[in-house]
Image: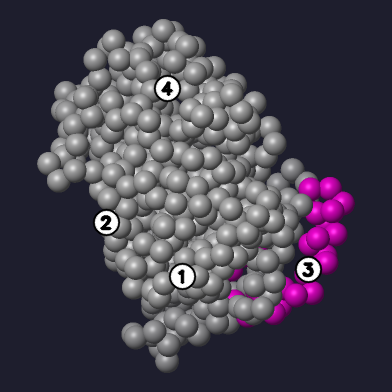
């Protein structure tokens, strides 16, 4: 990406484990900036290809002490976090975090804040905005109220491989050739390609000090959601879709409908659907005074879709909407003390000798989940996934970022990769709705005769009576689910080229 050279100035990127933050970091490095990443769980950044080139600090935007440390000596601070999907209190959480960030940035002498927010339709500024758009606008005002010059970029719908908006559009179009759709499919939107968003974010680092304002950013096309679905179908070489808008689908009903059809859970689908009630078209294009368009112009909608689909086909999706942690999911690591004193800890253990090399077995383990499945009773996993969706969880359909490779922090259906030691250990932490945290460990060892051994351990820490009841209620099914998984993983390794069978 062409852009200003940073001359080694230090940039802080909050939200570096998220969709935009994870893509912005390498662009800033390429532009010549030094980068510090703020993360609540720094280990999630460990396996990114750029991890060795950045400084990572642990902290949270709602913690003033950690923010003071993170902002020390920072020239440009990127605010790329928000509480989307974090329940009814997300507006208060967003407000408190923005106030802390603005005050700490001012105290640290930061020369510029850059914030990526959402658009505010001018004709509806005095009317009831969706909570999502209202909170985004409020965060922008809070950051601009500090003494630090702030650039607020207002983007409507970001089109790129792995973005929540793109995944929603993709699955609705691909799975429903005929659909009864909510009224918002007629609403005009000005989408923008993720590469243009990144170009603007990097460019804002070198804005003149007197620039302290918001900018609308968008691509060259203004389209209705129905138009975008038809154009997506054309780019993806699908038949033209029959789309019938009806007035009876409320925002809540349409978000549940989106949650059933797409991998995007209702907690995220609902704010996106609520935002689509409003026409979100750029009212100005002033950003080009400071960050000019490239010679070929901004990326159009159809090209953005084509580029995203190419990335998906080539398994080259660097970040996804699910890169960020699921709200409410446990974040504490698996208790490992032999005599753990924190309460009950249930475990299901399996071990099998495998007539295959450790390398063949590891390739099966690292490829688990997503389209490859879980090598177990399919109906049981499907039912558990649907139950999770009905309870507001993520379900099984998040899939994988990459079909063959995993890294720490990756989402994997309703699990998260907590630890990976290539060739030895894959530890997954559950992000499904459970009465207590749970983990699944897949390991490789050797027995006394030097044979490859597959080791599997499911661990559950019950919270209260409901947690104990849950474990004993599902334990009769463990032989089919976990026992079947161990047998089938071993068999898959033995039948791989180079395996023993």
Query: Does residue 162 belong to the magenta stretch?
Result: no
Of mark 1 and mark 2, the one earlier in the sequence is 1
Gap in angstroms between the C-alphas marked 1 and 2: 20 Å
Judge by depth and name the residue closer to the eye, 191 or 442: 191
Is label 3 in a helix, a strand or a loop?
helix
Contact? badges 4 and 2 (CB < 8 Å):
no
Q: Which residue is mark 2?
A: 303
Q: Residue furthest left?
A: 295
Q: Which residue is mark 3?
A: 474
Judge by depth and name the residue closer to the eye, 213 or 266: 213
Give me the disc on residue 70: 4
Contact? badges 1 and 2 (CB < 8 Å):
no
Magenta residues? 456-485
Q: Position of residue 351 (x, y in %)?
A: 59, 74
> For residue 45, what is the image quadrant?
top left
Contact? badges 4 and 1 (CB < 8 Å):
no
Q: Position of residue 15 (x, y in %)?
A: 45, 35
Instruction: Please indicate whether residue 247 sits to the left or right of residue 1 in the image.
Output: right
Residue 58 in view (yes/no): no
Q: Is residue 109 above or below residue 258?
A: above
Give me the disc on residue 349: none
Q: Identify the residue at horizontal 23%, vertical 29% (top origin).
A: 288
Judge by depth and name the residue closer to the eye, 30 or 95: 95
Task: Check disc 3: other Cα within 10 Å, few if <14, some if 14-19, many if 20+.
Answer: few
């Amino acid at each position: 990406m062409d852009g200003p050279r940073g001359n080694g100035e230090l940039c802080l990127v909050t939200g570096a484990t998220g969709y935009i933050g994870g893509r912005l970091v390498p662009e800033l490095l390429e532009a010549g900036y030094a980068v510090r990443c703020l993360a609540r769980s720094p280990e999630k950044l460990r396996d990114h290809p750029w991890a060795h080139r950045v400084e990572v600090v642990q902290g949270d935007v709602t913690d003033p002490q950690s923010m003071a440390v993170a902002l020390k000596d920072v020239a440009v601070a990127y605010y790329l976090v928000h509480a989307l999907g974090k329940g009814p209190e997300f507006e208060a959480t967003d407000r408190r975090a923005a106030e802390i960030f603005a005050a700490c940035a001012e105290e640290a002498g930061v020369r510029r804040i850059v914030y990526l927010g959402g658009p505010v339709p001018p004709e509806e500024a005095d009317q009831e905005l969706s909570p999502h758009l209202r909170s985004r606008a409020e965060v922008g005002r809070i950051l601009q109220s500090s003494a630090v010059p702030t650039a607020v970029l207002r983007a409507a719908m970001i089109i790129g491989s792995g973005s929540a908006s793109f995944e929603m559009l993709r699955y609705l179009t691909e799975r429903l050739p005929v659909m009864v759709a909510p009224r918002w499919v007629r609403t005009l939107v000005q989408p923008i390609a993720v590469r243009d968003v990144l170009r603007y974010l990097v460019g804002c680092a070198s804005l003149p000090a007197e620039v302290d304002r918001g900018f609308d950013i968008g691509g060259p096309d203004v389209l209705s959601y129905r138009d975008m679905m038809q154009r997506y179908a054309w780019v993806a070489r699908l038949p033209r879709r029959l789309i019938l808008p009806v007035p009876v689908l409320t925002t809540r009903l349409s978000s549940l409908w989106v949650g059933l059809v797409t991998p995007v859970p209702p907690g995220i689908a609902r704010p996106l659907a609520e935002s689509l009630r409003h026409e979100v078209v750029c009212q100005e294009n002033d950003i080009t005074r400071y960050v000019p368009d490239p010679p070929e112009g901004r990326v159009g909608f159809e090209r953005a879709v084509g580029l995203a689909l190419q990335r998906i086909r080539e398994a080259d999706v660097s970040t996804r909407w699910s890169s960020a942690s699921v709200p409410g999911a446990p974040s504490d690591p698996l208790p490992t003390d032999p005599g753990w004193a924190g309460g009950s800890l249930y475990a299901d253990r399996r071990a099998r000798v495998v007539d295959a090399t450790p390398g063949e077995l590891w390739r099966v383990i690292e490829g688990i989940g997503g389209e490859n499945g879980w090598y177990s009773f399919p109906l049981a996993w499907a039912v558990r996934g649907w139950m999770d969706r009905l309870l507001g969880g993520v379900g099984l359909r998040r899939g994988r970022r990459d079909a063959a490779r995993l890294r720490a922090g990756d989402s994997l259906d309703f699990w998260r990769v907590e630890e990976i030691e290539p060739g030895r250990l894959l530890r997954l932490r559950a992000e499904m709705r459970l009465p207590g945290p749970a983990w699944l460990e897949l390991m490789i060892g050797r027995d006394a005769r030097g044979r490859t051994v597959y080791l599997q351990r499911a661990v559950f820490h019950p919270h209260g009576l409901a947690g104990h009841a849950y474990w004993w209620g599902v334990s009769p099914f463990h032989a089919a689910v976990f026992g079947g998984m161990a047998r089938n993983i071993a068999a898959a390794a033995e039948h791989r080229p180079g395996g023993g069978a």
